[in-house]
Amino acid sequence: LSSAAAAAHAPAIRALAKESFPGDVPDDVSDDEVLSALAGPFHDPADCEWYLCWDAGELVAMGLAVRYHDALHVSNLAVARSRRRRGLGKYVLDGACARAGELGLPRVCGSVDPDAPHLLRLYRNIGAVAETSAFACPGAIVQPKVRMSAPIEVAAPV
């Protein structure tokens, strides 16, 4: 979904984000601003696509993707606690991989906390490998993210 379409689901997106990423969505951010808060300062929400998975009216998984040079970058990949370990994260990533192929992008990537082995495994299961670039400077207090990148088969134009 585009950010404009996803905005209709802002309360559900906020709830899943607050459960999955405590502290990333401040309480004073309105529903109108929640998508921008999750997109962060480096992405224009108009350039973002949202992958939302619903079950019986409940948002159970989501991801945000934005075109990033030669890749589709996935962030804010979240699965409701009660629904984890059921393949929903992979389902979201598979959707992003399909979209990357549609866009003619040769890879999907994401930044993963190095202390989240289940997320590293999830990306490895789609063929991703760790890139050597880091998202923190030497001596940083916060451990840098691991940038995982998976190749995508791009169909030849017909």
Image (tube, grey):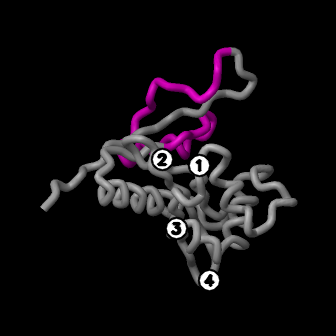
Near mark 1 (Cα within 10 A), the count class, few <14, some 14-19 or many ≥20, is: some
Q: Is residue 133 above or below residue 55?
A: above
Give the spatial CA distance, label 1 vs label 2.
Answer: 11 Å
**Point 64% across, 77% down: residue:** 8
Q: Earlier in the sequence, mark 1 or mark 4?
A: 1
Q: Amino acid at mark 1?
A: His
Q: Residue at x 16, y 54 (%)?
A: 156
Residue at numbered disc 1: 43
Q: Which residue is mark 3?
A: 2
Q: Is there CB contact under 8 Å for labels 1 and 3?
A: no
Alpha-carbon distance for marks 4 and 2? 27 Å
**Disc with the residue nearer the chain's start (2 vs 3):** 3
Check disc 4 and give the amino acid type: Gly
Residues 69 and 151: in front is 69
- What residue sits right under mark 4 in the picture? 57
Badge 2 density bin: few <14, some 14–19, many ≥20, Cα 10 Å: many
Circle 2 residue: 73
Chain part drawn in magenta: 110-138
